[in-house]
Amino acid sequence: MRVLYVSPYPPARDGIGAYTQVLARAVRERGHEIAVVAARPDPGAPDEVIGTLGDGGGASMRAAVARFRPDVVHVQFAVPAFGARSLAVARRPAASGVPVVATLHEVTRDTALLRGPGRALYRRLARGCDRLVVHTRAALETVDALGLDAEVTLVPHFSAPPPPATGTAAVLRARFGLGEDRVLLAFGHIHVSKGLDDLVRALATLPPAALGGVRVVVAGAVRRRHGPFRVFEARDHLHEATVRRLARRHGVRDRLVFTGYVPDGDIAAWFAAAEAVVLPYRDAEQSGVANLARAFGVPVIATTVGGLAELFEGSPWAVPPGAPDRLAAAIDDLLTRPAPARDTSAVRTTDTDLDTVAARTIAVYEAVRGPLARTPGNRPDAP
């Protein structure tokens, strides 16, 4: 089978792009041919990138389809991923006659933020697709509420193997002056919905004995946006500045470390250094960071929003969003317990395993090539 992916793609610094690269290469390892139409040009793009979306989007897609002759086109869709090109992708996800699958990475967040235009955008995309894929039951509920005219399959976000490590936890501790402090890791792009301000308020209420030996490492930077969506980038920069001011006001500024962009080679080292990963999100579709933490066997303190509620159901460190006092209690509880041995076996035996996700995704490709393609309304409610 020949699969053409439409997505941001490394070396672009984009979580959806990293997801697509891991998935595409897993599909290729199972004997299929893959190619990529990237959201934007980059001179360092790998060989599988055969084109990029131009300002119009449609002509670029048609050229890539004519060149690669795919059996299936798989669009990895979110408005931040394509920016001003989102409408072009939604209007023409592929050339006529080629089955189209679209994974909706941020349908809940996009439609809540963009309201009527966002809902219209997703309806337009769905009309051009043979199958939609979502990662969580919360996203499935959003799709149901939107009444999208396409069959939907739930395929969980995988727990991907991390990039090869080039740094060590000891080196990072020395570089950022962490000493022997216990590290709570807030990893990934800085975004207003990720609740860093709630985390600062939680730190301010920790007992002094606990706070003195703890550092929160904010390992990431504001995501770069393009075109008119730069207003959202500016909003996230403003949020970062607000978090820094709030930390000073509460007297915990010295407990926060901002690293900026994290190179791939340092990812494993940061998770090795972390006592726990903290996800104080106020809203979330799903979280690649959560799955990374599970892959490394690192405990997670998370709010019960979107797919995080499903992923950490029953955890003693799952707390409501927007509740700094409950977040502080979870942090204090985790820090006062004996550190558990790191165990990644749970990830390898669940449906978030990369092998399982790749197999289920290939099954979706095979399904849309069959006689039931473009037959809406037969959506299974379970994976």
Image: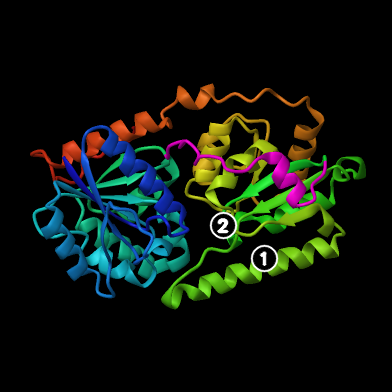
Looking at the picture, which amino acid does disc 2 mark? His
Residue drawn at 77 percent across, 47 percent down: 174
Name the colour scheme: rainbow
Residue 252 lies in what quarter of the image? bottom right
Please name the predominant secondary structure of the magenta segment in the image: loop
The residue tagged 1 is 240
Name the spot of residue 214 as percent of width and height, x first: 81, 44
Which label is found at residue 139? Answer: none
- The alpha-carbon separation of the residues under discs 2 and 1 comes to 11 Å
Q: Would residue 69 be found to the left or right of residue 377 on screen?
A: left
Please give the range of residues in magenta: 157-179
Query: In this picture, is 30 found above or below 60?
Result: above
Residue 196 lies in what quarter of the image? bottom right
Which label is found at residue 189? Answer: 2
Looking at the picture, which amino acid does disc 1 mark? Glu
Residue drawn at 79 percent across, 34 percent down: 335
